[in-house]
Image: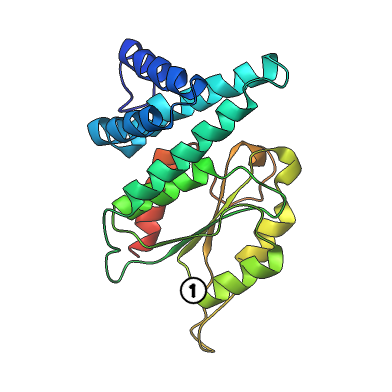
């Protein structure tokens, strides 16, 4: 059980309630349950103990039920995303903190975990730029040069979308005046990177570890 996670019985009750609302396609109930979970337990615990397990459960149901439940997964994902954005908008960025740039690799379309990280950073007053799914390499390079981030987080859900060459390319991007050029710290997030990273590249095991690492980097 993750640090700060809900007791298993309570977490299961919360997950069952959210899953039932999703199966009913009950948009209002999903919004209310998601918002209440974040307000009651905090974003990290709500994500790890309620939201993520429910998403996984709905995904497994879809896999075993053929074409059924795809609409349930899509609607639940939409409401999770909307709730995370509302949570992120509750606090203004702290002046002077370094920016974290978040993006999926060019072939990656799964964004929810990265959205959760963006919301968690925003809730701590840490500036973040979230570029979402499938950001082309050239656009990623331009975004890094224009924002001068302290850190870049690259998300890959599967081995097929992870790329060691992309990590090396992003690590090599420089900005600033000659003699005082800087490079970003690169974190490779998501299960797709397992066993595929060059030495020295951070690979946080979950949302809490990624948030802790980025908070330290942004305050340097």
2 with respect to 95 (left or right): right
134 with respect to 21 (left or right): right
Position of residue 131 measured from the top left corner of the image (x, y, whole percent): 55, 59
Which residue is depicted at the point 39% across and 25% down? 50
Position of residue 142 measured from the top left corner of the image (x, y, whole percent): 61, 74
Against 149, residue 210 (above or below) is above
Against 128, residue 21 (above or below) is above
Task: Say whether residue 173 is visible.
Answer: no
**Disc 1, SS:** loop
Front-lying residue, 150 or 119: 119
Front-lying residue, 2 or 71: 71
Q: Which residue position holds label 1?
A: 148
Which residue is depicted at the point 47% across and 29% down? 52
Front-lying residue, 161 or 59: 59
Task: Report the quarter where the N terminus lies.
Answer: top left
Position of residue 183 measured from the top left corner of the image (x, y, whole percent): 54, 71
Find residue 39 and report its image quarter: top left
Which residue is depicted at the point 70% across and 64% down? 137
> Dot 1, crowdedness within 10 Å: few (<14), some or many (≥20)?
many
């Amino acid at each position: 059980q993750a640090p700060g996670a809900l007791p298993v019985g309570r977490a299961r009750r919360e997950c069952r309630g959210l899953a039932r609302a999703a199966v009913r396609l009950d948009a209002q109930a999903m919004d209310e349950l998601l918002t209440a979970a974040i307000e009651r337990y905090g974003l990290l615990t709500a994500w790890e103990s309620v939201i993520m397990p429910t998403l996984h459960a709905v995904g497994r149901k879809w896999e075993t039920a053929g074409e059924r439940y795809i609409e349930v997964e899509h609607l639940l994902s939409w409401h999770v995303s909307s709730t995370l954005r509302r949570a992120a908008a509750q606090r203004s960025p702290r002046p002077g903190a370094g920016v974290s740039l978040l993006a999926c690799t060019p072939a990656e379309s799964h964004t929810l975990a990265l959205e959760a990280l963006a919301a968690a950073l925003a809730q701590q007053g840490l500036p973040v730029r979230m570029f979402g799914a499938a950001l082309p390499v050239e656009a990623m390079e331009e975004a890094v040069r224009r924002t001068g981030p302290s850190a870049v987080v690259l998300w890959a859900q599967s081995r097929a979308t992870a790329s060691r060459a992309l990590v090396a390319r992003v690590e090599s991007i420089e900005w600033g005046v000659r003699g005082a050029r800087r490079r970003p710290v690169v974190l490779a997030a998501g299960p797709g990177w397992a066993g595929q990273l060059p030495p020295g590249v951070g690979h946080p095991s979950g949302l809490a570890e990624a948030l802790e690492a980025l908070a330290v980097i942004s305050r340097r």
